[in-house]
Image (tube, rainbow, N blue to C red):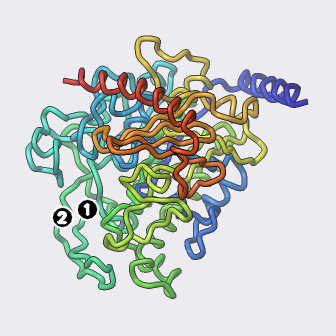
Amino acid sequence: MKCLGCFLGFFLFAQLTQASDRPNIILCMSDDQGWGDVGYNGHPHLKTPNLDQMAAEGITFTRFYSAAAMCSPTRASCYTGRHPYRFGVTFAMKGMLEPSEIPITRVLKEQGYTTGHFGKWHLGTLSRKQGDQNRWGAYAKDPERYYCPPWERDVDVCFVTESKVPTWDPLLDPGPIKSNGEIDPAPTSKPYGNEYFTGPNTTVTENTLGDDSRVIMDRVIPFIRQAVAAKQPFFAVVWFHAPHSPVVGGAKYREMYSGQPEPAQHYYACLTAMDEQLGRLRSELDGLGVAKDTMLWFCSDNGPARQGSPRHVGSAKHLRGYKLSIHEGGIRVPGLLVWPDKLQQPRKIDAPCSTLDYFPTILDVLGIDLPDDRLYDGISLLPLLIGEQDRREQALGFLNRDGQEAVWMEQRYKLIATAKKQELYDLLADPGETQNLAELQPQVTTRMHAELLKWKRGVMEDLAGVP
């Protein structure tokens, strides 16, 4: 009966794709939102009704992973389907979307899509000038070398910042926020230091006050309307800044959490404001008549920032670790997909899935083979989405801290390897990673470590070849 069900699921999908083989695609991402920072995962206070509705209607990935424990590398994986270390994106503001990579935007433009990127970029500098952005690290030292704006990576329409901005009045410095987050900063008209770019040497300041997620969505919706009017399939990347620092909540949204401490008011407020814009996006898609044939994905770029940072009260719930940690709390994130025409029944997928899988999945949906001149670390999730499979057949690899920490993850087991020790966890029985089984399961540990070293060696060889 299971085989028959799989066959019927595949047959149904094949029949549906005959009617529309170029779905619209939207990749939404929050910034530093923990696995527990959603209502549908049981948060006791945070209100995320639109994310909850997506979970109720579509696919909920109970084990969705950012490709890295931090921002830029994860974002690089979304565009390429390859581990970001392979092309030098190993840390925030370190590396870029190298010209030698094949971005998903290029593939989709060749299929007739119009492409747009809105919100955070973080995959290279937007200006060649020294010091004209709120930069640090490699980007500050050599903005010319890392000049890599989306308009030079097959993106038709842009409204992007190079990195972080405040979650309220994004172009203005909110003033000092104390480490405990308990005192409102005084209003200021001083520029924050990052700008919204729409093209080469072109920045925008109008309509940038208030909620940053709303500011972003105000640019997404006209892009979608224009594509629909032109009867052209569209690909939109919408990378919100919330709830990354500086965390500033608007009064309207803070009032919803008036019974919470001030840091929590701000944190919850900016997430609820972002959630509101996701609802606005879905309503717009419905009104334009394209909601059913739009793949709308959502995830976070990594786990929550460590509690104790200004106004960061993010939750990984029962998972161990925070942002920058290779433990589950740093890499397991909220993950959702709605695609009403093709995935009509809500359900949960418990297999490990990743931002690395976006690229292969989209190409599989379009009937396009992966390029054969390079290695891909992601896989197509289509067999999981249509119920043909219920487990991931290819392991997931993670690298952290310049490769000093490495992870090899299967359906059941997760191996963490450092220079000093190995840790093995049974994630099905122990998702909180409380019991190290490395010595109790030596055969599993040895096998997985050998596989990890082989994969890591290939990745680091690619990294060594980056200019």
Q: Quadrant of residue 85?
A: top left
> Please, what secondary structure does the residue beneath circle 1 have?
loop
Name the residue tied to disc 1. 171
Q: Quadrant of the N terminus?
A: top right
The answer to which of 329 and 56 lies nearer the viewer is 329
Residue at image point 34% right, 60% down? 207
Under tag 2, what secondary structure? loop
**Whole-percent x and y of residue 333?**
52, 52
Percent x, y of residue 406: 39, 39
Return the disc, 1 or 2, that comes first in the chain's sequence: 1
Q: Can I make out residue 25 in this image?
A: no
Residue that label 2 marks: 191
**Residue 270 image-quadrant placement:** bottom left
Do the residues under discs 1 and 2 have CB atoms within 8 angstroms? yes
Give coordinates of residue 440: x percent, y percent.
Answer: 57, 45
Q: Is residue 150 left or right of residue 175?
A: right
